[in-house]
Amino acid sequence: MNLIFCAYTHAPSVVGSHQLTGMGDDAKKRIYEKNICVALVSAKHHNPADEVALITTDAPEEPLRGELERAGVRVIQVPFDSFQMPDRFRWKLAFYKLCALHYAAGRPEYDRILLLDTDTFTVGDFTDLWEEADHGILLYPLGHTFSHFDRLPIRETARVLEGRDAAPVQYGGEFVAGNRKALQVFTDKCMEIYGQILSAGDAIPAEIGDEAVLSVAAERCRNLVRDACPYIYRYWTRDFYLVSTNAFSNPVPIWHLPAEKDLGMLCLYEYYRRKEALPSREKAAGMLGFPRARRPLLFTDLYLRFLRKKSHAGTR
């Protein structure tokens, strides 16, 4: 059996996502619940034969509980009893994903496992993803430069743990997939790194999140790691605008939408609640501000075509 899951825990005193800074605790929690609904319902819709689940510390209340039940999504309660980071870590709740992943990798009923962030939207099936997961751990490289501000704390963490600048590639925390045997090896390595981070104390930058553990573990398990880029893309769709036409061309089945937690993901949720169906790929792309699938025809294009035709005519 294949498992697709999102992991979620909640603590009022923890700041969390940049996009939800300044919101009240109840408002943030409800936004996450709507994101969870969109992420898991869309994953189940396109992969009906797979088990889809929310792994969480606390059973959800209505309306999320009923929404997940009606969509055929399970709820699995797992305590946050590992990867507990000190309070100085801003992203301490994000480490629950690793706790949930370690739990899932230890369950014998699952052959392959996929961890997704709650701000993802699935638009295709995972047939190829599962087949490739039989050959290693699929992680999503973010393409950040050596001195990128998000990569520097990860490099510093690796330097402290390894005693040298190991220069790990930065992998995103929104996607981890693999067969159970490989994930057991990988998550055991993550657990080892977690213990080393605790032992290192204040030498570890407080800015790190789960991506630091994943990236260092990937460096230590190079022979296991495969590129997840064919299956997911991180679209930045607001003031920081970094997008792609791979929603349509050479399409990925999973859209990660970190800037849309309290905007586009809520539009997708409201559409689902009203229509009791998910929007088409084209409709969803329009709602999220993606670029058009085809390059627009410009005046310069017409002029260049004229010159090309004139040039070809002159060679006859």
Image (cartoon, rainbow, N blue to C red):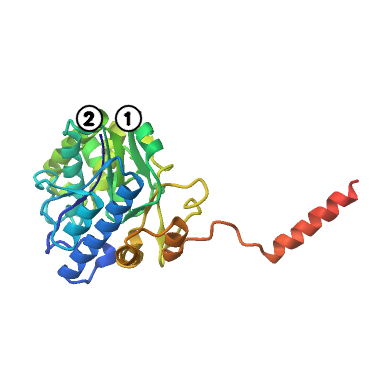
Q: Is residue 167 above or below residue 19?
A: above
Q: Nearer the viewer, residue 12 or 71?
A: 71
Q: Nearer the viewer, residue 122 or 178?
A: 122
Contact, mark 2 vs mark 1 (Cβ under 8 Å): yes
Give coordinates of residue 280: x percent, y percent.
43, 57
Q: Give the residue type at disc 2.
A: Val
The mark found on residue 206 in the picture is none
Q: Secondary structure at mark 2?
A: helix
Give coordinates of residue 234: x percent, y percent.
39, 53
Give coordinates of residue 113: x percent, y percent.
26, 38
Residue ID at (9%, 47%): 79
Quadrant of the image occupied by residue 224? top left
The mark found on residue 185 in the picture is 2
Q: Nearer the viewer, residue 61 or 216?
A: 61
Q: Is residue 269 above or below residue 93?
A: below
Quadrant of the image occupied by residue 58? bottom left
For the N terminus, the quadrant is: top left
Name the side, left or right, on which 249 lies relative to 48: right
Residue ID at (21%, 71%): 23
Q: Is residue 164 visible?
A: no
Name the side, left or right, on which 289 lies relative to 174: right
Q: Nearer the viewer, residue 196 or 27?
A: 27
Q: Label 2 vs label 1: CA separation?
A: 9 Å
Q: Is residue 121 visible?
A: yes
The mark found on residue 224 in the picture is 1
Q: Secondary structure at mark 1?
A: helix
Q: Give the residue type at disc 1.
A: Leu
